[in-house]
Image: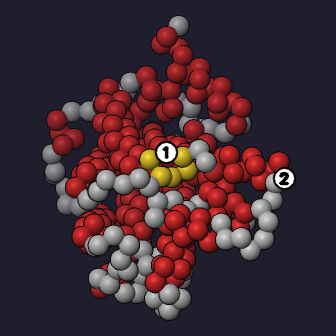
């Protein structure tokens, strides 16, 4: 009975959604993106649920000015109560613990064709099996995601100070769900290859020259990772609540977010199934990352303008040069 629990759980979930595992992953990323965007467009929701950490301080102060009587409607009370459900901002570290553990878990599952792998892989529809990733692609993307998780976990410990900052509990849950989902998204379009492959020591030997795609996209991942690390290190070195003036920040408010988007975009390109330009499942994760960080970048610019003056960052792009 225990052995059948996971497959039956996956079956019930997919039957309820009327989709296979690939479509469920894509739908999750896109639905979460639309939800975040919708919340950010409504002032009454954005001011309560979007800002966190230092960005929430000025928002709260400005919203509490006695310019007009506060509403006492039931909906307002419900929204205020939901907004009060917060967790420590230090819980961000848990995202990368989850990412690291997920990478290790799925490595074991893929190599052993474990129950969790079988529960998902055997429930991928045939149309998503026709074009598949190679074993080398699956391994490369796994290694890069593992490296990303290790680096970000190290930065959480190395570049952190004691703080009373908080974030809305839904931010925390969404982050955990994202890292659990993206660890599956990176291999699920290689299901056909993984189901028929038998792992051996030959898989870890390098016998062939890297493909043109790897040659072009791997440097993007490495460069973006280095840029993000430098940005995080610089922000950590700043005196608290100081306007960044490093060259990375002179044209972009949040270059570390730009780097994050580039990291996942490079993974989407590296994980493209044979005959495809890009991995659509990972691309949907890129959409989530871009929307989520784009909203946060907008709040960061708003916070800078409130704290350091309207002209302090007016000419800087939020996150993507010449676009946003």
Q: Position of residue 156 (x, y in %)?
A: 30, 53
Q: Residue at x 84, y 53 (%)?
A: 73
* Residue 73: assigned label: 2
Q: Which residue is mark 1?
A: 87
Q: Secondary structure at mark 1?
A: strand
**Could you tell me residue 106's position as x and y percent?**
36, 35
In the picture as drawn, the residue positioned furthest to the top comes out as: 1
Q: Residue at x 39, y 59 (%)?
A: 267
Frontmost residue, 237 versus 262: 237
Specify the quadrant of the image occupied by residue 292: bottom right
> Residue 6 or 72: which is nearer the viewer?
72
145 versus 98 height, above or below: below
Percent across and percent down for residue 102 are: 37, 38
Can residue 9 be seen here? yes
Per the image, label 2 sits on a secondary structure element best described as: loop
Q: Is residue 174 visible?
A: no
Closer-to-camera residue (17/243): 243
Tag 1: Cα neighbours inside 10 Å, few (<14), some, or many (≥20)?
some
Quadrant housing the C terminus: bottom right
Compare marks 2 and 1 and give the one earlier in the sequence: 2
Residue depicted at x 15% and y 45%: 205
5 above or below 160?
A: above
């Amino acid at each position: 009975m225990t052995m059948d629990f996971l497959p039956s759980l996956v079956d019930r979930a997919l039957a309820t959604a009327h989709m296979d595992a690939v479509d469920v992953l894509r739908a999750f990323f896109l639905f979460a993106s639309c939800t975040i965007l919708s919340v950010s467009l409504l002032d009454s929701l954005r001011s309560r649920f979007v800002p966190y950490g230092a960005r929430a301080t000025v928002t709260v102060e400005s919203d509490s000015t006695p310019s007009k009587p506060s509403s006492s409607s039931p909906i307002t009370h419900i929204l205020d109560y939901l907004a009060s459900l917060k967790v420590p901002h230090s819980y961000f570290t848990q995202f990368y613990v989850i990412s690291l553990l997920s990478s290790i878990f799925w490595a074991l599952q893929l190599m052993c064709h474990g129950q969790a792998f079988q529960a998902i892989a055997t429930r991928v529809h045939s149309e998503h099996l026709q074009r598949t990733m190679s074993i080398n692609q699956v391994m490369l993307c796994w290694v890069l995601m593992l490296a990303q998780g290790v680096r970000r976990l190290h930065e959480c410990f190395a570049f952190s100070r004691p703080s009373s900052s908080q974030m809305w509990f839904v931010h925390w849950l969404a982050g955990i769900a994202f890292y659990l989902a993206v660890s599956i998204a990176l291999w699920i379009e290689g299901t056909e290859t993984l189901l028929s492959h038998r792992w051996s020591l030959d898989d870890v030997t390098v016998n062939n020259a890297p493909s043109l795609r790897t040659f072009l996209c791997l440097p993007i991942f490495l460069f973006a990772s280095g840029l993000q690390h430098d940005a995080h290190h610089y922000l950590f070195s700043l005196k608290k609540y100081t306007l960044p003036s490093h060259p990375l920040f002179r044209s972009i408010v949040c270059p570390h977010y730009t780097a994050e988007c580039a990291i996942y975009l490079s993974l989407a390109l590296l994980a493209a199934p044979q005959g495809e330009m890009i991995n659509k499942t990972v691309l949907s994760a890129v959409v989530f990352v871009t929307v989520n960080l784009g909203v946060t970048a907008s709040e960061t610019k708003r916070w800078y303008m409130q704290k350091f003056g309207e002209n302090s960052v007016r000419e800087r792009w939020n996150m993507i040069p010449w676009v946003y």
